[in-house]
Image (cartoon, helix red, strand yellow):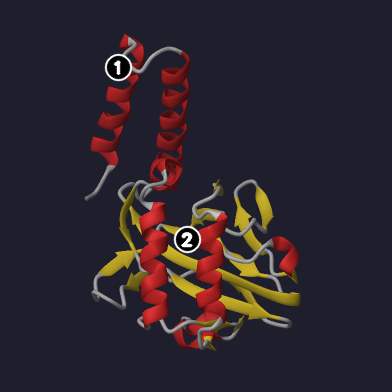
């Protein structure tokens, strides 16, 4: 299941991040690709442990971990530091699946990639092409979001970035390990949480059945989570 998280960053935050990224020095993206994806990857990345990536990554994580929809959808256990990439005309990242295990460049901690995230930092009218195309159970979906919006999708999905044919596409991308490993269980918990919140708005957060359902939600997390 693909989930769009709107407005992780507001326009002022996007503008400040873009100003720093546009002035940064980029390197060949193949340096961080796995063996299979190296042959299909043509883009530029910021050095992961450089000052720009670290400062901007921290800012993104601060915004994200305060975003209720993100927390509800991802149930994050550990999040890797955000990375940044840039595709100019002719650049692309062909069909691949992301590596299962990632090592944090900052802490050397290992993490299982359950969810992949792309946070768009260019407006859709700044470039042509560059759609993130994700194979989903419901078919193939082409994603191109407003700057500041993010898509969250299972790391088990085959995906690609179509060639950019005009302008430049800048984004942040990263991975997380969820407390809930199963995509199906996590999707069910997300649906349940959103339903409980809608019910609480319509009735009252102290309504007896809303409280009971909230208890069931937490007990399901207790049953399924790994922490
Ligand atoms: Ni990928």
Tag on residue 42? none
Q: Can residue 114 be seen in this view?
A: yes
Question: Image quadrant of residue 72?
Answer: top left
Tag on residue 212? 1
The residue at the point 60 percent across, 52 percent down is 136
Of the two numbered discs 2 and 1 on the same chain, state the one appearing first in sequence: 2
Q: Position of residue 116 (x, y in %)?
A: 47, 60
Q: Is residue 11 left or right of residue 141?
A: left
Q: Position of residue 137 (x, y in %)?
A: 60, 48
Q: What element carries label 2?
A: strand
Q: Is residue 100 visible?
A: no
Task: Give me the C-alpha separation between circle 2 and circle 1.
Answer: 33 Å
Circle 1 crowding by C-alpha within 10 Å: few under 14, some 14–19, many from 20: few
Q: Is residue 125 left or right of residue 206?
A: right
Where 202 sits versus 32, above or below?
A: above
The residue at the point 24 percent across, 48 percent down is 226
Number of numbered discs overlaid on the protein picture: 2
The answer to whether the residue bearing label 2 lies less than 8 angstroms from the nearest atom of ligand 1 is yes
Where 155 sits versus 190, above or below?
A: below
The residue at the point 54 percent across, 79 percent down is 37
Q: Mark 2 points at which residue?
A: 116
Circle 2 crowding by C-alpha within 10 Å: few under 14, some 14–19, many from 20: some
């Amino acid at each position: 299941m693909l989930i769009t998280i709107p407005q992780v960053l507001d326009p002022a935050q996007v503008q400040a991040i873009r100003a720093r990224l546009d002035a940064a020095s980029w390197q060949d993206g193949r340096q961080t690709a796995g063996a299979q994806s190296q042959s299909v990857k043509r883009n530029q990345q910021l050095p992961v442990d450089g000052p720009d990536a670290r400062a901007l990554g921290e800012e993104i994580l601060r915004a994200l971990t305060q975003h209720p929809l993100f927390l509800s959808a991802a149930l994050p256990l550990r999040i890797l530091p955000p990375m940044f990439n840039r595709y100019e005309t002719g650049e692309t990242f062909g069909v691949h699946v992301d590596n299962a295990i990632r090592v944090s460049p900052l802490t050397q901690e290992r993490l299982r990639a359950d969810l992949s995230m792309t946070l768009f930092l260019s407006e859709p009218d700044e470039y042509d092409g560059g759609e993130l195309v994700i194979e989903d159970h419901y078919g193939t979906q082409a994603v191109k979001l407003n700057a500041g919006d993010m898509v969250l999708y299972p790391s088990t999905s085959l995906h690609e970035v179509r060639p950019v044919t005009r302008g430049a596409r800048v984004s942040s991308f990263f991975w997380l390990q969820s407390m809930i490993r199963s995509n199906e269980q996590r999707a069910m918990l997300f649906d349940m949480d959103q339903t409980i919140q809608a019910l609480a708005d319509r009735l009252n957060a102290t309504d007896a059945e809303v409280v009971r359902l909230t208890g069931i939600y937490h007990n399901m997390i207790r049953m399924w989570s790994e922490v």
